Image: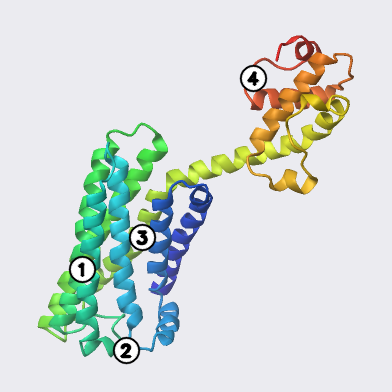
Amino acid sequence: MQAITLITASAVLWIAAILCLPSFIRGHRRSLFWFLATFALTMSLQPKPVYDAVDSLLGSVNATYFLFHALAIVTVGLADVMVQQTVSASGVTRNRKMITAIVGGLIITLQAAVFFTSGWHTKADISRSFIAEWSYTTYAATTWVTIAIFSISVLSACLVDLRAQTRMVTRLAVKILSLGCLCILIYVVNSLIGATQTTLDPTFVMPGWRESVQKFVLLVAPVSLGVGLGLTSAIDALAASRQSYRDRVLLWRITPLWQRLLRDTPYLSIERQLSPRQLLTVSGPGAHLYRRHVEIRDSLLLRPEQPVSPAELAIIELAEQRTQLGSPATHSTLVDRTP
């Protein structure tokens, strides 16, 4: 059950990262993409089948456990910088980013020293339960406390930003992100108490209700963070994809008319020819649709006697509405309107 929970959380994060990929390629939301990808990779190491497979490649010494903690610190650092940059009027300063990177690097270095010089890091059950060793509790606490500090920072920024947001989807995203931060704090407190109790009493077993709470927040926290940080981007990406699809379909439909009308007046056109394959794959189909629509208008203005069927007029009208140039198209308005 726990493996299914973790795999579900990882899948949600990978989906969010994939939805953010088009924006990343265009040079936008790069911080968000790196956060989602790093977070997804971090959570992907948790399910036991994945953990065992990766650890066998790393020498079967629980190096995957160390990798998970290091990636967790990098993830929360990226989240903090990104959220602070979003809510700050002047953005995050270079010094703030540098301090976050240095602090994160120092913590990971300290963890490496504690982890690889300990005797417990080779135990087979290290990823399944707490270890009755103070060095283990110190090691794990560095991650938990760091995550808690960054979570409080992000939560505070969210509460401040919530009052300034007017877009409903963004307000929802901020609330979901805040829920994720609260779940992280619950996980941290429960883990710190559990590790300390195990160290003091090696026979300690976490009560069932606390174990249930731990599993619940372990699912809700990453899903909430992924959805909260990626929701607005995903909605915008889906809207842009829908617009691009509609523009591409209309571009395909209007191209034969454009080719026919511009055949005898090629000097009116600055639009390049596109093959059928390019019509399906060219980036920015809206720009090509706009230029072809304008050139059709210019051609009809210059040669109003050219025949245009009702079906072609309907296509021109759709292009008119899509490019937001004004009133519905008719043959007379097309030839009377100045370019």
**Left or right of residue 188: residue 322:** right
Residue 206 image offset from top left, x and y in percent: 21, 76
Q: From mark 1 to mark 2, how far is it between C-alphas?
A: 27 Å
- x 81%, y 17%: residue: 300
Q: Are marks 1 and 3 in contact (CB under 8 Å)?
A: no
Tell me which residue sits at (79%, 14%) in the image: 301
Amino acid type, callout 4: Leu
In which quadrant is the C terminus drawn? top right
Q: Which residue is mark 3?
A: 222
User: Is the Cβ of the residue at disc 4 closer than 8 Å to that at disc 1?
Assistant: no
Q: Residue furthest front?
A: 267
Sequence-wise, the earlier of marks 4 and 2 is 2
- Could you say where residue 88 lies in the image, as x and y percent from the top left? 26, 40
* Amino acid type, label 2: Ala
Instruction: Give the mark nearer the N terminus: 4 vs 3.
Output: 3
Residue 240 coordinates in the image, percent (x, y):
56, 40
The residue that label 4 is drawn on is 325
State the quadrant of the N terminus: bottom left
Could you say whether the residue bearing mark 3 is in a helix, strand or loop? helix
Q: Which mark is residue 124?
A: 2
Between 325 and 42, the one lying in front of the other is 325
Q: CA distance from mark 4 to mark 2?
A: 68 Å
Estimate the spatial distance between the alpha carbons at disc 4 and disc 1, rounded to whole Å. 58 Å
Q: Amino acid at mark 1?
A: Leu
Q: Residue at x 27, y 54 (%)?
A: 181
Which of the numbered marks, if any, corresponds to residue 241?
none
Residues tagged 3 and 2 counted as in contact (Cβ below 8 A) = no
- The answer to whether residue 143 is visible is no
What x and y, as percent, mark residue 96?
A: 23, 51
